[in-house]
C-alpha cells in the first residue's frame, strides 16, 4: 500500500535557515557544468561570487536569441541560456591576465571556502592562481576543477564540450531510432550531470574539511561523468560482451516500455513488472494476453516484443492519449502523454511543485523573469531564490566592499591598474 502523497511543497520563506549559509564559493566557471553546480549551491544558501571576463563575461551571455530585453527593448546581456544556470550569484568582471586582477582573485580565494573553476589544466597555475598557489595561503581551501577530459590520460589537453563528450562517451550510439543517425540528448546532459557530481564532491570535501581542518583538490570531468551515467547500458556490455544498439523508445531490459501511437498522438507505457503487465492487459480489454506463455514474464516479452507489439498496436491506436492515460492510471499502470516543453511547463503538477518560479528582472524595474525552480524540497532548510541572474559586473563594488572591505578609492585604484579590464 502506497502512503498518501505529502502536501505540496511550500514556497521558500524569506529568512528561513539555509543549508549552506556561511559558505563562500568563488566561481571561476562558465557555460553550463560549473555554473549549474554553483547555482545549486547558491540556491542552498551559499554566497557565490561569479568572476567573469571583462567585456563579454560568461560565454552563454551571448548564446541567443532569446535575450531578456532592457528598458529600451534592446537585447541585454542576459540570454535565456545564461538565465538557466546563474541565479543566486554576484557578478564581478576581473581581468585575470593583469597583475592587479590576478591579485584580486587571490585575495577573494583566500576568503572563500571553495574555488570552482573550469580552465584547461595548468592555465590558472601559469598565472599564479593554481591550487598549490592558493592552498599555501589557505590550507583548508576546497578546490574543484571541472574539465572536459580530466587532468591526465591521452585526452587531457583536449577542449571538451557537451556535444563532443556525448559522442565520444557512448550515449549517442544508443540514442535515436534503430535505423536512424546517432542522436544527442536534447539538453546538455553531460554538462548537467558533471555539475551534479561536482556539488556532491564539494560537499564531501567540505565534510572532510570540517572534521579535519584539511582542504583538498578534487576534479570532475565531462568525459568521466558521461561514462559513469551509461549505467545499465554499460554494465549490459560489461556482462554480455555485446555492444548495445539504438532502440528508439524501447528499453533494452524491460517490455513493454516504450511509446505507442494512439488515435491523436503518442502514449508512453512503462510496464515495470509482471503484475503491471497483467493490469495493463486487463485495462486494454485483453486479459488473456497476460497468460500467453510468450508474454507472461518480462524476459519472454523482451524476446517476443515484435510479436507482442503486433497485438498491442491496433488496440492502442483505437483510443486517444487522454483516454488511455485515464484508463491506465486507474489500473495503476505507469503511462502518460509525450508532452511538449510548453505543455510540461504549463502542467498543473509542474506549477504545484514550484518548478516554475518568477523573480524580479534585474534590467527592467517592475518586470519579472520566469525561471525553472529547484527540485530539492528541504523542509527545515528550503532552497531560496534571492537573486536573479545578474548583468555582467553588476555586483563589483558590493562584493569588494563586503568580502575584502575595500572602499571606493581602493576600487578606483584597482580599476586604474587594469584589474577590471580596460577602463571605459
Image: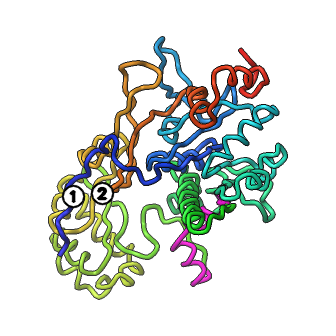
Indicate the quadrant containing the C terminus: top left, top right, bottom left or bottom right.
top right
User: 21 left or right of 377?
Assistant: right
The x and y percentages for residue 97 are: 80, 34
Q: Which residue is mark 2?
A: 267
Indicate the quadrant containing the N terminus: top left, top right, bottom left or bottom right.
bottom left
Q: Nearer the viewer, residue 258 or 23?
A: 23
User: 149 left or right of 236?
Assistant: right
Query: Would you call the spot at circle 1 few (<14 residues within 10 Å), some (14-19), or many (20 or more)?
Result: many
User: 330 left or right of 421?
Assistant: left
Residue 269 within the segment the image draws in magenta = no
Query: Image point 68% across, 55% down: which residue?
Result: 145
Q: Which residue is mark 1?
A: 325
Q: Nearer the viewer, residue 193 or 420?
A: 420
Are the residues flagged by discs 2 and 1 in contact, CB closer than 8 Å? Answer: yes
Write the start and end of the magenta stretch as one range. 219-241
Q: CA distance from mark 2 to mark 1?
A: 8 Å
In the image, residue 347 sits, relative to residue 295, either above or below, namely: above
Question: What is the quadrant of residue 369 in the picture?
Answer: top left
Query: Image point 29% across, 85% down: which residue?
Result: 296
Residue 236 within the segment the image draws in magenta = yes
Question: What is the quadrant of residue 418 in the picture?
Answer: top right
The x and y percentages for residue 325 are: 21, 58
Magenta: main secondary structure equals helix
Amino acid at each position: 500500500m502506497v502512503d498518501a502523497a505529502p502536501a505540496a511543497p511550500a514556497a521558500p520563506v524569506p529568512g528561513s535557515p539555509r543549508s549552506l549559509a556561511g559558505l563562500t564559493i568563488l566561481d571561476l566557471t562558465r557555460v553550463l557544468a560549473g555554473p549549474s553546480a554553483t547555482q545549486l549551491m547558491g540556491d542552498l544558501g551559499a554566497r557565490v561570487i561569479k568572476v567573469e571576463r571583462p567585456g563579454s563575461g560568461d560565454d552563454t551571455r551571448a548564446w541567443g536569441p532569446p535575450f531578456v530585453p532592457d528598458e529600451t527593448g534592446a537585447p541585454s546581456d542576459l540570454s535565456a541560456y545564461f538565465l538557466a544556470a546563474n541565479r543566486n550569484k554576484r557578478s564581478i568582471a576581473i581581468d585575470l591576465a593583469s597583475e592587479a586582477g590576478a591579485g584580486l582573485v587571490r585575495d577573494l580565494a583566500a576568503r572563500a571556502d571553495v574555488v570552482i573553476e573550469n580552465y584547461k589544466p595548468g592555465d590558472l597555475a601559469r598565472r599564479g592562481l593554481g591550487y598549490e598557489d592558493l592552498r599555501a595561503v589557505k590550507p583548508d581551501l576546497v578546490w574543484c576543477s571541472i574539465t572536459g577530459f580530466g587532468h591526465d590520460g591521452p585526452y587531457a589537453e583536449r577542449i571538451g564540450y557537451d556535444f563532443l563528450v556525448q559522442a565520444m562517451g557512448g550515449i549517442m550510439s544508443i540514442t535515436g531510432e534503430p535505423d536512424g543517425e546517432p542522436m544527442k540528448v536534447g539538453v546538455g546532459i553531460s554538462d548537467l550531470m558533471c555539475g551534479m557530481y561536482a556539488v556532491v564532491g564539494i560537499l564531501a570535501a567540505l565534510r572532510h574539511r570540517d572534521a579535519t581542518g584539511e582542504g583538498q583538490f578534487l576534479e570532475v570531468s565531462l568525459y568521466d561523468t558521461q561514462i559513469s551515467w551509461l549505467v545499465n547500458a554499460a554494465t549490459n556490455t560489461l556482462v554480455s560482451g555485446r555492444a548495445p544498439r539504438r532502440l528508439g523508445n524501447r528499453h533494452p531490459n524491460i517490455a513493454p516500455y516504450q511509446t505507442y501511437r494512439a488515435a491523436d498522438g503518442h502514449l508512453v507505457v512503462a510496464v515495470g513488472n509482471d503484475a503491471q503487465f497483467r493490469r495493463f492487459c486487463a485495462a486494454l480489454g485483453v486479459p488473456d494476453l497476460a497468460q500467453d506463455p510468450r508474454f507472461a514474464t518480462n524476459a519472454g516479452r523482451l524476446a517476443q516484443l515484435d510479436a507482442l507489439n503486433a497485438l498491442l498496436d491496433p488496440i492502442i491506436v483505437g483510443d486517444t492519449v487522454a483516454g488511455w492515460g485515464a484508463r491506465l492510471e486507474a489500473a495503476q499502470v505507469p503511462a502518460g502523454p509525450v508532452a511538449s516543453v510548453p505543455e510540461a511547463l504549463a502542467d498543473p503538477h509542474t506549477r504545484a511543485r514550484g518548478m516554475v518560479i518568477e523573480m524580479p528582472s534585474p534590467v527592467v524595474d517592475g518586470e519579472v523573469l520566469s525561471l525553472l525552480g529547484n527540485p530539492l524540497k528541504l523542509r527545515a532548510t528550503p532552497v531560496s531564490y534571492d537573486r536573479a541572474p545578474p548583468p555582467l559586473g553588476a555586483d563589483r563594488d558590493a562584493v569588494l566592499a563586503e568580502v575584502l572591505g575595500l572602499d571606493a578609492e581602493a576600487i578606483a585604484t584597482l580599476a586604474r591598474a587594469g584589474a577590471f579590464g580596460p577602463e571605459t
